[in-house]
Amino acid sequence: MSFPTTLDHELSRVVEKVQHGERLTLEDGLTLYHSPDLLTIAQLANQVNLKKNGDRVYFIQNMYINPTNVCEAKCAFCGFRRSPGEDGAYTMTPDEVLEYVGERFTDGIREFHIVGGHNHTVPFDYYLNTISILKKHYPNVTIKAYTGAEIEFFARMTGRSMEAVLKELIDAGLDSMPGGGAEILTERYRAKMSPDKASTDQWLEAHRIAHNLGLKTHATMLYGSIETLEERLIHMIRVRELQDETNGFLVFIPLAIQPRSVNASIRRRTSAMDDMRTIAISRLMLDNFPHIKAYFINIGTQLAQLSMQFGASDLHGTLVEERISHAAGALTQTALTIDELVWLIKGANRVPVERDTFYNEIKVY
């Protein structure tokens, strides 16, 4: 694929590195963030993705489950958490989780995506039993549960190591881990935005241990608040380095931060340009990640469709009911049907592929 001959010197240098398969540095990432030529960056990311994944774009039939919103942490960006006894606070018992799933389950669902608050008012057995009851009744559904930050919380709560906690969860039926709790993996950011949660090193270590125990996991990045562009790139480089070490990440998910209210001004939301640029840069920086996901919950369905030309190869899933971003002020749909996902992917001239959690192909549309 050819690029314009009028590119500025710095961007030309990055294009050349990518075309020669050379790894990009933090400085290269800054060049991509500062360049006005977004379409060349999109073209470059698209080229990289097509080389990795061809014209296939993946989605899954999954269900989000948020068993509790009671949380000891007070993250600055969260509209979901409640304190014990606060109006709107809830904790579903494992039996209630099972009932919730039973009322919404359809035969095609292949994954339960479980995250919630760091609820310190219930014992660790609560979290084990939530998984084991679902695995007992839905043995063929993959359980993707508990973020790296939750794993650190469980370890702290029980006085056990993260490895011991993860082994118990795996015995209960844990198959994979979501990528949340990462936010931005620098201590300056975490001290301001999520001081009560796992540190950078602890989040990375939770995933390192999970990978070494045989779990494949996910990685997210919550961008659009107080972080610098350098910090976004440091975050990408840190997960890239862990991927070099373990090859345990399946996908990287840039998450646009949501304002605390649905009535917030558009100036409080990330811009379409930043969303598309960040997806493209993620694809270019994370050369060892198979997939970059466009999360329609945060950026909307139309930008998610456009992102397939910016390096994204995954459109997430059906979800059934998303709560956390919508509690914060997301304006998007809480779920999509298979027909809608297929329509979005075909509309981008890509081939829709239904997958399982581990990117095994179930059906090509």
Image (tube, rainbow, N blue to C red):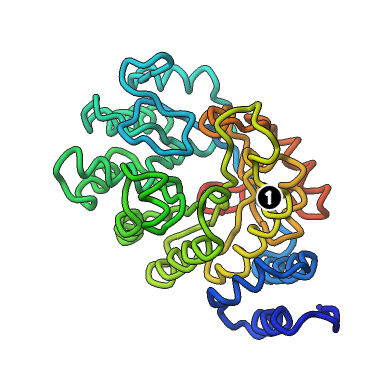
Q: Find residue 209 and report its horizontal and vertical position in percent.
A: 29, 58
Q: Quadrant of residue 143?
A: top left
Q: Which residue is located at x 20 percent, y 43 percent?
A: 156
Q: Find residue 82 and report its horizontal and vertical position in percent.
A: 39, 24
Give above or below for 198 relative to 6: above
- Total numbered labels placed on residues in the image: 1
Q: Nearer the viewer, residue 228 or 280?
A: 228
In the image, is 306 to the left or to the right of 328? right
Q: Quadrant of residue 326?
A: top right
Q: Quadrant of residue 119?
A: top left
In the image, is 290 to the left or to the right of 333? left
Judged from this view, the residue extending furthest toward the left is 159
Q: Which residue is located at x 73 percent, y 71 percent?
A: 44
Q: Residues within 10 Å of mark 1 (few under 14, many from 20)?
A: many
Q: Which residue is located at x 43 percent, y 42 percent?
A: 144
Give above or below for 29 relative to 168: below
Q: Nearer the viewer, residue 299 or 262?
A: 262
Give above or below for 209 relative to 35: above
Classify mark 1: helix, strand or loop.
strand
In the image, is 157 to the left or to the right of 327? left
Residue type for callout 1: Val
Q: Mark 1 sits on what residue?
A: 353
Q: Find residue 39 and report its horizontal and vertical position in percent.
A: 80, 65
- Quadrant holding the N terminus: bottom right
Q: Find residue 171 and report its horizontal and vertical position in percent.
A: 26, 42
